[in-house]
Image (cartoon, rainbow, N blue to C red):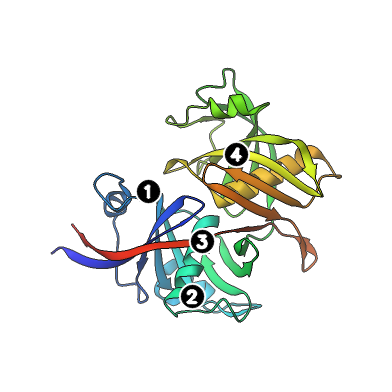
Amino acid sequence: MPQTVSFTKGHGTGNDFVIVPDPDGSLELSDDQVAVLCDRRFGIGADGILRVVRTNAIDEGVELTASESSSGPVEWFMDYRNADGSAAEMCGNGIRVFARYLAEVGWASLDDGPLAIGTRAGVKTVTRSELGLEVDLGPWRVDDADVLVRARGIGAPRPGLGIDVGNPHVVVALPDTRELDGLDLTAQPQLHPEPAQGANVEFVVPADPLVRDGVGAIRMRVFERGVGETLSCGTGVAAAALAVRHWAGPAAPDHWAVDVPGGTLGVRMPEVDGERHVLLSGPATLVYSGEVTLA
């Protein structure tokens, strides 16, 4: 039997999502259903699905129900699915949109301090910031293993740096904006060797000068696994800033502004409880709500 469900459309710097409320975890979306909802011609159109489910109502969240973040119990879990239906660990733009939705419908508050949200990459906290909302993505990991990246429009393969911020990324430095603009990301970049779980691939160009008033600046385009090129990728923005900071050396700043086709996001790397975390900030917008019938 066809089923009618409510949804809200939202985006963070053009990285857009279909938000589906399912507090009790009663809705099972197949990969095909997710793909149709995200289809820009035959569905609502989005880069992914954010299913809003209580942490104790989804298998991946059950172990988080016993934990408490510094901001309290972890009541909500972000079940993020890529546009092809595949599950993903995290989404930096998506979690800000997710938090905005919880606040708008009255299921949580952003006015009482950090809001803890469960994800497949663990518990993340979201707070208000000057740019909109800021998510603490936690510690990161740099993988110095050699990866070669082939992409249309850049000729010979380029070396990439692996950065894990809760999900995997490979960042490629390009020499100028002409080469960045000339990329053809209608085809998926090829990674050699290919990571077991795949990876998002970011192409970055440093600003000139790289640092102004203590803030680093870069431009970025991204190909997201399971989606394609998107106007923005929050975790990719964080990974790109971390990669350029890694290449720039110990004198590099801990604050970055990253321009993507959909806008500008902020990244900072403060010390939290004795270790470095990476935090992502930017806008989160809810566009419209409606109902859709699932085949």
Q: Which residue is mark 2?
A: 103
Q: Callout 1: few (<14), some (14-19), or many (20+) C-alpha neighbours within 10 Å?
A: many
Check disc 3: other Cα within 10 Å, few if <14, some if 14-19, many if 20+.
many
Q: Which mark is residue 284?
A: 3
Between the residue at mark 3 and the residue at mark 4, the CA separation in whole angstroms equals 19 Å
Query: Relative to 262, is 21 on the left or the right?
Result: left
Front position in the image: 252 or 1: 252
Q: CA distance from mark 4 to mark 1?
A: 21 Å
- In this view of the protein, can residue 164 be seen by the observer? no
Could you tell which of marks 2 and 1 lies nearer the N-terminus? Answer: 1
Choose the circle earlier in sequence order: 3 or 2. Answer: 2
> Residue drawn 68% across and 40% down?
218
Q: CA distance from mark 2 to mark 1?
A: 25 Å
Q: State the residue at coordinates (56%, 76%).
A: 110
Among the two numbered marks 3 and 4 on one chain, the one whose residue lies closer to the N terminus = 4
At x 60% / y 49%, what residue is drawn? 264
Q: Tell me the quarter of the image containing the N terminus.
A: bottom left
Where does label 1 land, which residue? 83
Looking at the image, residue 233 sits to the left or right of residue 36; the answer is right
Q: Element under label 2?
A: helix
- Quarter occupied by residue 27: bottom left
**From what the image shows, is residue 273 above or below residue 267?**
below
SS category of the residue bearing label 3: loop
